[in-house]
Image: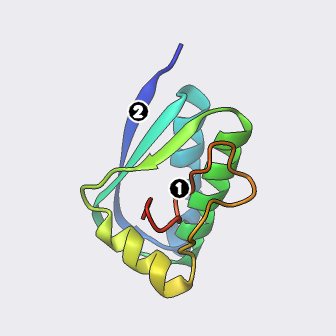
Amino acid sequence: METTVQLELSGELTVSRADETAAALGAALAEHTVVEICFRNVSALDLSCLQMMCALHRTAAAQNKQVWIKEEGADVFRETARRAGFVRDRACSFSVDGKCLYRTEAT
């Protein structure tokens, strides 16, 4: 049975909050088949958050689950990914469906 959760992250998603952020992402994926992440209330994020999102997406793909970035508030995620060089023109090798959080059309 497919279950979806909308996880709304907030504040600064930086290395100082990495444990807290990783726990929230992991719990959402453990309990649901689709995780929609909203960055609407995020004031800043750094490379640690981008790496966690990549790891989450890989784990989801391996478990035949899905992770999506909600459009509302995605600008901070997109801009940080672009500045860090994470944006891609094709899906990563871990993708089973040709999708990637950092693919140009996904970000």
**Closer to the observer: label 1 or label 2?**
2
Q: Residue at x 67, y 56 (%)?
A: 55
Q: Position of residue 88 (x, y in %)?
A: 57, 72
User: Which label sits on residue 54?
Assistant: none
Q: 49 and 103: which one is in front?
A: 103
Q: Position of residue 92 (x, y in %)?
A: 68, 61
Q: CA distance from mark 1 to mark 2?
A: 18 Å
Horizontal relation, residue 17 to residue 40: left or right: right
Q: Quadrant of the C terminus?
A: bottom left
Secondary structure beneath label 2: strand
Q: Compared with residue 39, is residue 78 higher up or lower down, i.e. above or below?
A: below
Horizontal relation, residue 52 to residue 82: left or right: right
Q: Residue at x 56, y 64 (%)?
A: 18
Which residue bears the numbered disc 2?
A: 5
Which residue bears the numbered disc 1?
A: 20
The residue positioned farthest toward the top in the image shown: 1
Residue type for callout 2: Val
Mark 1 or mark 2, which has the lower sequence index? 2
Secondary structure beneath label 1: helix
Q: 96 and 74: which one is in front?
A: 96
The residue positioned farthest toward the bottom in the image shown: 83
Horizontal relation, residue 43 to residue 64: left or right: left
Q: Compared with residue 27, is residue 18 higher up or lower down, i.e. above or below?
A: below
Residue type for callout 1: Glu
Q: Compared with residue 62, is residue 57 higher up or lower down, i.e. above or below?
A: below
